[in-house]
Image (spheres, rainbow, N blue to C red):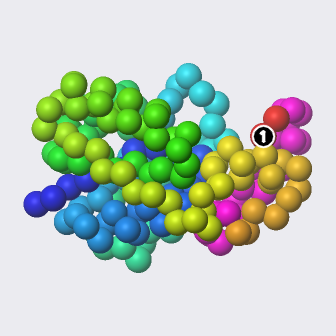
Amino acid sequence: MKIAVYPGSFDPVTKGHLDIIERASALVDELVVGVLNNNAKTPLFSAEERVKMLVDVTKHLKNVRVEAFSGLSVDFVRRCHAGFIVRGLRAVTDFEYELQMAQTNRSIERGIDTIFFTTELNYAYISSTVVKEVAWYGGDISGFVPPEVTEKVYEKIASRKADGNQGG
């Protein structure tokens, strides 16, 4: 059975992420979307909220499972009994970082390879950071995130503003 893991923060999940999930899931028996719970960062959404959003937007993909994790991606990949890590590349600037991570993961665990997917051109400029910034200033994010996610982002931003937070 071919199992792959697509790790990331997905804060929030974008149409670019969903594109990679759909394409990667077509190549493997099971795709595990690993939602990184990084205590060093303050995400907009909790890991549980991000998992729920991903479950909602991938429910049409029967071989996709979503799970939160913390720690090294390569350790999570081992726990999932996967042989591949899936990563998306939007631009040349992503490549240097992603190549370094792939080589590091390969040196830690020789049995795990990384598969890179280039993002569809119409999603190449989208990142979770851009989504949050546009939403923070009241811009339209409906072209950036799945419909199930749009309102959740605006609600979370409004909540943060009401609490007196100064950034998206």
Bounds of the magenta segment: 144-166
Above or below for 41 versus 137: above
Is residue 8 in the magenta section? no
Pointer 1: what residue?
168
Q: Which quadrant holds the C terminus?
A: top right
Looking at numbered disc 1 in the image, what kind of residue is underneath it? Gly
Q: Position of residue 58 (x, y in %)?
A: 44, 68
Position in image of residue 71 (x %, y %): 37, 27
154 above or below 48? below
Residue at 22 percent across and 64 percent down: it is 28
Q: Residue farthest to the bottom? A: 60
Residue depicted at x 41% and y 62%: 21
Q: Is residue 110 toward the left or the right of residue 145 in the image?
A: left
**Nearest to the observer: residue 49 or residue 115:** 115
The residue at 68%/44% (across/down) is 129
Above or below, 57 relative to 159: below
Q: Given the current orientation, which residue lies at the most extreme front position?
A: 92
Residue 99 drawn at (x, y percent) = 38, 36
Residue 129 vertical placement versus 99 (above, below): below
Q: Secondary structure at mark 1?
A: loop
Residue toward you, 17 or 107:
107
Using the image as rendered, state which of residue 26 and residue 132 is in the foreground.
Answer: 26
Residue 70, image quadrant = top left
- Magenta span contains residue 163: yes
Residue 136 visible somewhere in the drawing? yes
Quadrant location of the N terminus in the rendered image: bottom left
* In-front residue for pair 98/43: 98
Could you classify mark 1 by the number of other residues whose Cα lies within 10 Å: few (under 14), some (14-19), or many (20 or more)?
A: some
